[in-house]
Image (tube, coloured by chain):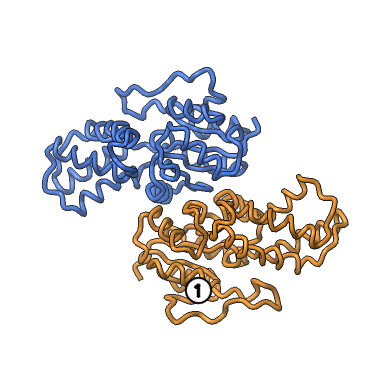
Chain colours: A orange, B blue
């Protein structure tokens, strides 16, 4: 494959959002006595994400970036989970848990190996500030941070992948989209990207229902990002 | 100063475009017998840059990114300097000398020190692909690559700095613009950025006329990026 660049989905593919949110919730419980079913809270927060983006897609909301959509969902969850008494600063800090996500254990090494040969970019629905802070916090290094925000469309809308290819200056067929989610890879493929599927069996926890069966059309399937680097000869 | 992020001008501030172009021209002369006054060629190429951006500003040209403007100027220079016989691939390679610029000797260390504490971003008129390839080639690491391309305006138009602040998610007053050029710093200041002036006395060669006298309104003046890191306590 004549690949020149790799674009990475972030939430779930490179970072373990669920474990991070549960841990931060449990810390809030220890330190401030805020009680909740944190695994259910994490799943509900992430569960609000697709419907929120759909509201932007349908024009019910103007362009709201993911920080803002996360906050909108959080405000509803605080009511639903009966979490009271947080100050505005505490709510803002809680919302920024998405800036402090923990990478999967293979992510830093895998990405560093891939960077030796390829241009390696984030390509997420997360906004640029969120992605930049998250990478810095976790010690992940990107050559370039790209986002749905730059196209004002959310993945898997084709504009996101098209804008990324234009900005990277490579034809789509020279770019490998790396993701744990089939709909993201199919979206990239529709624009002409190559595709690598990384099943993340624990993304949604022990009782979750992650994408597991690769589509036959995917170019690569790897068990994690170190395996992907190895398959690409790095 | 409550700085959270630094945005860097690139051509001349972090990278030594003139020395790079002269060296690559001299190599072309040795290897392929292409003769020219390379210092004058480098100055003419860079000299075409502001007028070309002005044509975009005035609407005489649609949005052309810097790779495309560089190529437009190069095509004229090849005629003016009577450089014949280059293939399309050789012209494209020559135009991409801007992707292979050499950093000033203090740049990699200075930026790495600044990254320990701050979000550190490129903010250049160069397009994203150009900036990404240049950094990777030179071993410079940015937390995030921002460009005039994302605002479809060229610096010092205020839209460029405003877009950068929005994407970084910080108020302009928490961002320090770092540049060797007074007009760039004044443009950033007009939007509320803090400013650091780094005079680059050799940017235009031994007979050049670089900006040397800092404006009194600049927040910091440093002799290079290592000195800037030191002044910021890093």
Q: Position of residue A103 (x, y in %)?
A: 62, 62
Quadrant of the snapshot with the N terminus of chain A: bottom left
Mark 1 — on which chain does it sit? A
Is residue A127 left or right of B99 when viewed as pictured? right
Is residue A32 left or right of A38 when viewed as pictured? right
B186 lies above or below B128:
above
A169 lies above or below B17:
below
Q: Is any part of residue B18 visible from this angle? A: no
Q: Residue at x 43, y 39 (%)?
A: B124
Q: Residue at x 85, y 61 (%)?
A: A35
- Label 1, residues with CA under 10 Å away: few <14, some 14-19, many ≥20: many
Is residue A19 left or right of B71 when viewed as pictured? right
Q: Quadrant of residue A79?
A: bottom right
User: How many tags in the picture?
Assistant: 1
Q: Position of residue B224 (x, y in %)?
A: 48, 31
Quadrant of the snapshot with the C terminus of chain A: bottom left
Q: Which residue is at the front of the view, B74 or A107?
A: B74
Q: Position of residue B160 (x, y in %)?
A: 46, 37
Q: Is any part of residue A30 visible from this angle? A: yes
Identify the residue under disc 1.
A197
- Identify the element where label 1 is drawn: strand
Q: Which residue is at the front of the view, B177 or B140?
A: B177
Q: Quadrant of residue B39?
A: top left
Q: Residue at x 25, y 44 (%)?
A: B71
């Amino acid at each position: 494959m004549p690949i020149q660049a790799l674009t990475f989905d972030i939430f779930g593919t490179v970072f373990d959002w669920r474990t991070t949110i549960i841990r931060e919730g449990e810390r809030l419980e220890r330190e401030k006595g805020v009680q909740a079913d944190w695994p259910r809270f994490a799943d509900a927060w992430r569960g609000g994400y697709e419907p929120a983006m759909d509201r932007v897609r349908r024009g019910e909301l103007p362009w709201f970036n993911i920080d803002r959509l996360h906050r909108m969902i959080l405000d509803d969850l605080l009511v639903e989970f009966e979490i009271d008494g947080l100050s505005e600063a505490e709510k803002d800090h809680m919302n920024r848990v998405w800036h402090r996500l923990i990478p999967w254990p293979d992510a830093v090494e895998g990405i560093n190996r891939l960077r030796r040969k390829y241009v390696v970019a984030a390509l997420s629905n997360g906004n640029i500030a969120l992605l930049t802070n998250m990478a810095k916090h976790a010690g992940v290094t990107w050559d370039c941070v790209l986002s749905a925000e730059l196209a004002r469309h959310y993945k898997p809308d084709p504009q996101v992948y098209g804008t990324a290819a234009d900005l990277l200056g490579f034809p789509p067929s020279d770019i490998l989209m790396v993701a744990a989610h089939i709909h993201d890879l199919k979206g990239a493929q529709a624009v002409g990207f190559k595709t690598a599927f990384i099943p993340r069996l624990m993304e949604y926890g022990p009782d979750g229902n992650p994408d597991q069966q690769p589509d036959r059309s995917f170019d690569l399937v790897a068990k994690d990002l170190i395996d992907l680097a190895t398959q690409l000869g790095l």
